[in-house]
Amino acid sequence: MENKKKTGGLNLGAKGLVIVILAFISCYLYSALTSDSLNLSIGIFGELGLNTNVLWSLSSIATVLGILGSILFGKLMAMKTASKIWGMSMVGIAVFAFIWSRSSAVAVAGNAKLALIIYVVGYFVCYVLTLVNSMLLSSQVLANWFPTKRGVAVGIATAGFPVSAATTTSFVGVMAAQIGAFYVILAVVALVTGIVILVYSKDFPEEKGAYPDNNKNYDFETARKELKQNLEYAKTSKWTIGKCLRTGRMWILWITVGIGGFLAMGIMSNFFGKFTEQGYEATEIYVMLAIAGVIAIPGSMFIGWLDYKLGTKVTTFLINSLAVVAVAFNLTNVHALHYISLPILALMLGGSSNMMVACTQAIWGRYDFQNAYRVIQPLNAIMTGIGITTVGLIGTNFSYMSAYRTLLVLAVIAVVATIILKVEPIDEDVARVNANLRN
């Protein structure tokens, strides 16, 4: 308790809060462009002449591209700085979201084949860039800035997911007649955010005259000295990508947090179809999405607070256990249980990403985080992409109840993996170089 008082409680500091807000926008754009908008946008483009089965199947290909993109951007991040790559990729999102917007106009003009090509290019590039922005680059910067308050910082940032869940589907519904404008608006948001990141963001708080965790009692000169020493350690650390891949704990971590990503993205991208199948009207589904999103905004931050107070392992266990409950509720035809599941489902959306960062850093620490995260993030990208495609294809070709039975089995497996996972420094070297940063 004494050490937590020293670190300033939950106060992230003004400079740190800016970093968190930029990460929040990254999460929002990822969820809005690649998941939540699909609830309606695929049907809208289908009415414009594009093959909806082809559009749904794009998520599988995008998953592979996301993995390759994560590996590529992980290397770029190591060569340059995460913050600069983050800013440049955000500008790239702006460019390709605008290109994506043109597909609707081309389809209206009667050229469905060209419209599909434009759609595919825009979707694929935006998928990769928003994925690495929200799940790799911004997470790396947050982990550097908040080594012990990672849960709090990431909890606020990942609130971008439920905010998108609450707003995007309704927004797309309003923009249905001018769907291209939806992508233009998000392109403008991405462009402004990218410029701010390039001008403002740094990989480490020490580079901005700030403190890790906003701990102002930590001597600044000592902080600079220790940062320099530990960055030298990181250059020769035995925790290379290859060693991480050969470590059993990495694969248990993947099951623990990856299934959460599978559930979250699979459920939220097919939310509209699932509840339509169960007899809900469109207006009520919009309300349900809004309820889930509004409740989960503070809920995502609450997950961060739980991580700070109860520890990462306990918080991860709670999230995965709640996922079992939420999916089970949705396998019934009881409307009251459906509504009770809404905030839980939305918590999963932010919680899975939150716990991926928190668990990785709790195990590998601040200075080995980059190598370990460059492994777990692409692995997690496999799960999120497959989740979107699997639930969509099973739901549209068979039934969403069949899809949810599969999800229930996976959710139980995630709980078991959480119990097995050791959430503690993986070796003595990691414990030593992070000794002054542990809470």
Image (tube, rainbow, N blue to C red):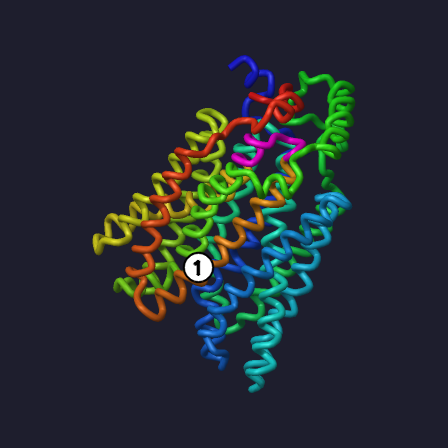
Write down the quadrant of residue 435 in the picture.
top right
Query: Could you tell me which residue is drawn at 73 percent across and 44 percent down?
Result: 78
Q: Say whether residue 333 is left or right of residue 290.
A: left
Residue at label 1? 269
Residue 51 part of the magenta segment: no
* Residue with the most extreme front position: 246
Is residue 253 shown above or below 436? below
| Residue 341, position as x, y percentages in the image | 32, 47
Query: Could you tell me which residue is drawn at 64 percent across and 31 percent down?
Result: 366
Residue 363 part of the magenta segment: yes
Closer to the camera, 75 or 161? 75
Can residue 229 be seen here?
yes
The amino acid on which the numbered mark 1 sits, given as a three-letter code, is Ser
* Residue with the most extreme bottom position: 110
The overriding secondary structure of the stretch rendered in magenta is helix
**Picture quarter with the C terminus:** top right
Write down the quadrant of residue 81 in the picture.
top right
* Residue with the most extreme top position: 2
Query: Could you tell me which residue is drawn at 54 percent across and 13 percent down?
Result: 2
Closer to the camera, 152 or 67? 67
Judging from the image, what secondary structure is the residue with disc 1 in? helix
Magenta stretch, residue numbers = 358-368
Can residue 144 be seen here?
no
Closer to the camera, 71 or 426? 426
Is residue 32 shown above or below 249? below
Q: For the residue carrying disc 1, how many other residues have a C-alpha within 10 Å: few (<14), some (14-19), or many (20+)?
A: many
| Residue 256, position as x, y percentages in the image | 44, 41
Query: Could you tell me which residue is drawn at 32 percent across and 59 percent down?
Result: 284
